[in-house]
Image: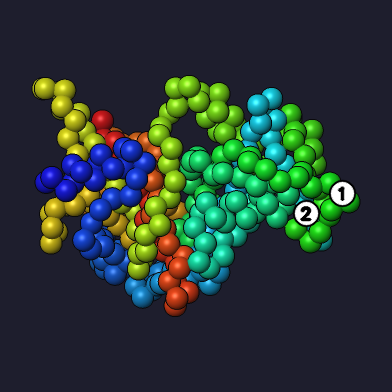
């Protein structure tokens, strides 16, 4: 039990867990068996493997705010959206960490160098597209002007109101809002600085911290799995379903059809490595999940 308590402390500090093996209590094979028992044709092969740009996509987006509260934006050069504005963002390359990819995108698209300080949020479309949203501090470089336009971007600038621009997509509004909220509370931050841990996994895994507060003594209890060894419960992410769908199916597997009221609270950290020489990429999201 000491190892579980130690891992909880690590997660609350924004760090990756320390385990001697990769735990997964509810694999795709298990999920397919449950579906088949209910007469539902499984939609995902049990042999699914996350391979970058083939079966999984990792995106980074950097939301940088200056002292005046302005947001760093770049003007697109791609023919499909040329002239429109967006946050510095792009796909991760093989061998990159999340912070390295974000710093590269900022430098290529805005001309500035940046120190990535924390992960702000993780977004997912189905279970095979993930966007890691980060923020940090500009440390140098020269803001790109139209005279320096290239295939990466036409220019970059600090913007007070992104709504005044012709945007490539409105999906960046909640990202900008989250970053501004985070920086406005920098004296009393919501969470410690969180940077994804560089750690390889063979599958896409969602590890849960499921908590309940006992009314009798007001103590908080954490659910653990005792399969093979005591650990935090973990499920394989179904790449053809939403993350919430995967989560609900796993919660139903744990608690049964009479699922108690519960609400996801957020992401504690991410474990990800893209340096596997075979080209496979994988991640473990550490989500806190509270059962009232």
Residue 120 coordinates in the image, percent (x, y):
50, 40
Q: Earlier in the sequence, mark 1 or mark 2?
A: 1
Residue with the mark numbered 2: 153
Q: Please give the name of the residue rendered at 21% of the width and 61% of the height, measured from the top-left corner.
A: 20
Q: What secondary structure is marked by label 1?
A: helix
What residue do we see at 29% from left, 64% from top? Answer: 27
Q: Is residue 222 left or right of residue 144?
A: left
Observer-nearest residue: 256 or 109?
109
Q: Whole-Å distance between the Cαs marked 1 and 2?
A: 9 Å
Q: Along the horizontal axis of the image, is 192 left or right of 154?
A: left
Figure colour scheme: rainbow
Seen at 18% across and 42% down, the residue is 5
Q: How many marks?
A: 2
Q: Is residue 154 visible?
A: yes
Image x and y of residue 131, in percent: 54, 52
Q: Can you identify the residue that label 1 sits on? A: 146
Instruction: Give the camera-side residue of 157 and 34.
Output: 157
On the image, which quarter does residue 229 sit in? bottom left
Q: Left or right: 113 with respect to 283?
A: right
Circle on res. 200 = none
Name the residue at the bottom extreme: 278
Q: Position of residue 153 (x, y in %)?
A: 78, 54
Q: Which structural element holds mark 2?
A: loop
Residue at figure coordinates x 50%, y 25% from the top left: 186
In screen coordinates, is 176 left or right of 25?
Answer: right
């Amino acid at each position: 039990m000491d190892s579980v308590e130690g891992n909880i402390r690590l997660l609350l500090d924004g760090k990756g867990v320390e385990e001697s093996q990769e735990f997964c209590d509810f694999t795709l094979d298990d999920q397919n068996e449950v579906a088949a028992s209910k007469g539902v044709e499984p939609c995902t092969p049990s042999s699914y493997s996350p391979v970058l740009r083939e079966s999984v996509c990792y995106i980074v987006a950097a939301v940088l705010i200056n002292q005046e509260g302005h947001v760093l934006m770049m003007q697109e050069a791609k023919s499909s959206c040329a002239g429109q504005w967006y946050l510095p963002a792009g796909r991760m390359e093989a061998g990159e960490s999340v912070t390295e990819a974000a710093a590269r995108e900022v430098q290529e698209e805005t001309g500035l160098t940046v120190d990535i300080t924390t992960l702000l949020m993780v977004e997912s479309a189905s279970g095979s597209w993930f966007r890691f949203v980060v923020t940090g501090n500009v440390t140098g470089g020269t803001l790109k002007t139209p005279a320096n336009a290239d295939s990466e971007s036409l220019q970059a600038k600090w913007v007070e109101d992104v709504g005044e621009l012709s945007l490539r997509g409105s999906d960046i509004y909640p990202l900008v809002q989250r970053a501004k909220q985070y920086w406005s509370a920098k004296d009393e931050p919501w969470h410690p600085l969180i940077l994804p841990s560089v750690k390889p996994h063979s599958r896409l895994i969602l590890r849960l911290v499921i908590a309940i507060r006992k009314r009798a003594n007001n103590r908080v209890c954490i659910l653990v799995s005792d399969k093979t060894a005591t650990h935090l419960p973990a499920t394989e992410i179904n790449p053809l379903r939403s993350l919430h769908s995967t989560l609900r199916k796993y919660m139903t597997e744990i608690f049964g059809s009479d699922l108690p009221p519960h609400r996801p609270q957020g992401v504690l950290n991410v474990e990800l490595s893209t340096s596997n020489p075979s080209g496979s990429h994988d991640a473990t999201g550490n989500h806190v999940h509270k059962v009232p």
